[in-house]
Amino acid sequence: MGYYIRALPQKKKPPHWKVQFVTYKRKSILNPKAKKPKKEWDIPPERWPGLKFRSTMNLAQAKLRQQQLNSQLELRRQEERRKSIEVEQQTFDKKCSAYLPEIYKKEFENRYIFARSQERLKKSKHLSHW
């Protein structure tokens, strides 16, 4: 997903390119072998200044700007994914610590689990089950 520059060599007036936004639908779980349908939207020249495109740019400059925009989009997606993973981790930690507070857990481990495992050379059954 992202911006794409299409060359228009047959066009008589500059610019000899146009800006499009291309998106792909995700594959469904039911049919993973299906091809991804692709959608393309032309971005009108009136919206180009907001994306920092100018009609005076040549094709190479427009493609360079397109790469910059796509890398910014990818960074945003990565940041959103990182935040969602962090939230999932926090909720998982809350679920796991809801039954036994951390202080009691450490005391239990020191007193019953690790104390018994230090007595024996092999790992104790208690430690492997814990």
Image (cartoon, grey):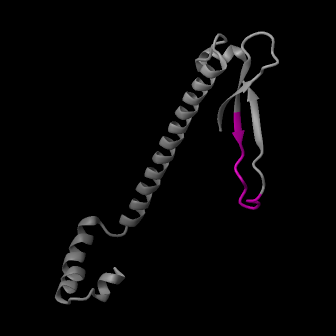
Q: Quadrant of the C terminus?
A: bottom left
The answer to which of 39 and 16 lies nearer the viewer is: 16
129 to the left or right of 81? left
| Residue positioned 47% across, 52% down in the render | 85
Query: Which of the 4 image quadrants contains residue 95?
Result: bottom left
Where's residue 128, x and y in %?
Answer: 34, 83
Q: Quadrant of the N terminus?
A: top right
68 to the left or right of 104? right
Circle count: 0
| Residue positioned 77% across, 45% down in the render | 37
Q: Main secondary structure of the magenta part?
A: loop
Magenta-colored span: 22-33
Q: Is residue 26 rendered magenta in the image?
A: yes
Instruction: Say if 14 sits above or below 41 in the image.
Output: above
The answer to which of 95 and 62 lies nearer the viewer is: 62
Instruction: Say if 13 sits above or below 62 in the image.
Output: above
Q: Is residue 7 rendered magenta in the image?
A: no
| Residue positioned 21% across, 88% down in the render | 121
| Residue positioned 73% across, 11% down in the render | 14
Where's residue 115, x and y in %?
Answer: 18, 82
Where's residue 25, x and y in %?
Answer: 72, 46
35 to the left or right of 118? right
Query: Which of the 4 image quadrants contains residue 40?
Result: top right
Where's residue 60, x and y in %?
Answer: 62, 22
